[in-house]
Amino acid sequence: MKTLRKKYLIPLTSCLVLGLVGPVFAHPFQDVDKHWAKNQIVWAYEKGIVSGVNANHFSPDATISKGEFYRMVNQYFGFTRKADIHFTDVTQNMWFYDEVRKAVAFGYISDYTGTLQAMSAITRDEAARILAKVYKLPAQTDAVQGFSDKSLIRNTGEVG
């Protein structure tokens, strides 16, 4: 009995310790180490929420397209349900097709016949509107008064 315990005690203890510590992932990006958002980028990368522009670069100061933002929201919240969509500029062979279907299914963008322009840059205004819908936040229209570009904001309540 003692030999059996010793035989399994060290491997079992090693497995438990390694399991508690867990693997430490290194990020592959050469362009984020001195960026102000490094910790957030690495966290989002490790969670599978974001990926780089290629194997070695993230491009942290680049604009984010609507399609990329929809993907990040869907990944972060674990949205998987999909709806039928009718955008004239979103077809099944586009990488963001399913991301748009999820966005419509979860109601943070509306489906309509027309163009979505998912490859164009998302604005702060649009991102705020989406996040306000997802989090079900109340509109705070007066809160935008401190923004220098308040005249450009369409969704004042959500940005606020």
Image (cartoon, rainbow, N blue to C red):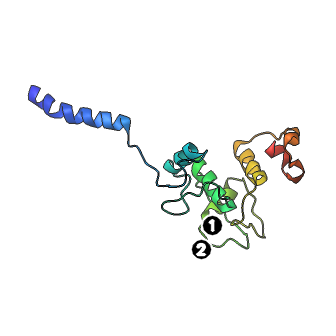
Q: Nearer the viewer, residue 113 or 18?
A: 18
Q: In which quarter of the image is residue 53?
A: bottom right
Up the image or down, 5 lies above or below 138; here it is above
Q: Farthest residue to the right: give it.
A: 151
Q: Which amino acid lies under the numbered mark 1 shown in the image of this protein? A: Tyr
Image quadrant occupied by the C terminus? top right
Q: How many marks?
A: 2
Residue 64 place in picture, x, y as percent: 67, 58
Query: Do the residues bearing badges 2 and 1 touch, measured as CB atoms within 8 Å?
Result: yes
SS for dot 2: loop
Up the image or down, 46 lies above or below 137; here it is below
Q: Which of 66 and 136 is in front in this view?
A: 66
Image quadrant occupied by the N terminus? top left
Q: Which of 43 and 96 is in front in this view?
A: 43
**In this figure, which residue is indicated by the disc labeled 2?**
93
**In this figure, which residue is indicated by the disc labeled 1?**
97
Residue 69 place in picture, x, y as percent: 66, 56
Residue at screen point 62% across, 65% down: 96
Residue 157 place in picture, x, y as percent: 84, 44
